[in-house]
Amino acid sequence: MRDISHKAATLRIATAEARLKVRPETIARLRNKDVPKGDVLEVAKVAAVQAAKSTSQIIPYCHPLPVDFVDVAFALNEDTVRISVTVKAVYKTGVEMEALTAASVAALTCYDMLKMLDDTMEITLLRLVSKRGGKSDYRNKFAVPLRAAVLVMSDTVAAGTKKDQSGRLIEARLREEGLAVEDYKIIPDDERLIIDALSRYADELQMDLVVTTGGTGLGPRDTTPEAMAKVIEFAVSGIMETLRAYGQARTPNSMLSRGVAGVRGKTMIINLPGSKRAVAESLDALFPGLFHAFAMLRSDEHPPDPEQIEA
């Protein structure tokens, strides 16, 4: 199985379709519920729901996941039973295999219950109709790359006694996400220097995103939150709530971070801890959902959220 422990749980939705070709007279018997084994479609519906919940026991590399909803619909055409299954779950991985497994089991259940009446039956289709809720829904869709800067606040790194790892990790991840990293800077844990650097990024360079690392703890030189209070025009509390909740599920120390996220002008500024591991986890929690913020900052109208668009 693939390691998905770094992923955040989001609403996942998938719809799959299967088709069973039968004789026209078989369709008539289905409509009239005139089948010796009972109500075929009701049994197939129950089988599909059970299959969706049991997919990880059937397909080896599927993760067990909490299925929140399964909808099974049938359409009877002249010589075809069309089966549509929609599965929803709030989890770290998609539910397309659950939908496909459910649709296939529904088709097989119909086949089993009808085989004594129709020896011409054929499952002619099994396909994924749609899926959403994963990373691809929130990918970077900006034609012109967003401009970013990385600011490292550390007395020891600035003095050259310690090598920066967190800042370089941020820089690499931002580039991986399609951002243009135009500046990378190291300064000591000095409140005045932090204020000046952040103000310059927002006011003069007009960066889209500034990500800082360091100075968010409880030490006497951890002054990043205090500097941020004098720089940003308003806080975006939900970002840090998300980062701390994500981190707390992985280490009990996340609650001690005092990092702040906020906006100055059109620039989003986000404070990450100094720890390399904490930075990596924070970036996993930030992307790709953070991209929605820049569309909002650039427009008076909020763009549609993929989670609010009905399938």
Image: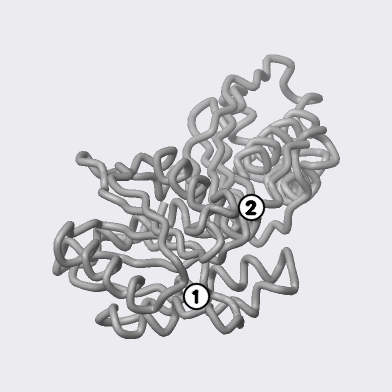
Horizontal side of 147 relative to 13 (left or right) equals left
For residue 122, which numbered disc appears in the image?
Answer: none
Q: Residue at x 53, y 33 (%)?
A: 128
In front of the other: 214 or 35: 214
Three-letter amino acid code at disc 1? Gly
Front one among 52 and 256: 256
Coordinates of residue 186 in the picture (x, y in percent):
42, 56
Q: Residue 311, position in %: x, y?
A: 42, 51
Query: From the viewer's perspective, is residue 29 above or below residue 70?
Result: above
* Left or right of 187 in this view: 86: right
Nearer the observer: mark 1 or 2; the answer is 1
> In the figure, 217 relative to 79: above or below?
below
Identity of the residue drawn at 38% across and 63% down: 308
Examine the image and state in which quarter residue 206 appears.
bottom left
Q: How many marks?
A: 2
* Residue at x 75%, y 25% (from the top left corner): 117
Tag shown at residue 92: 2
| Residue type marked 2 | Lys
Task: Specify few, some or many for label 1: CA neighbours under 10 Å numbering under 14, 14-19, or 20 or more.
Answer: many
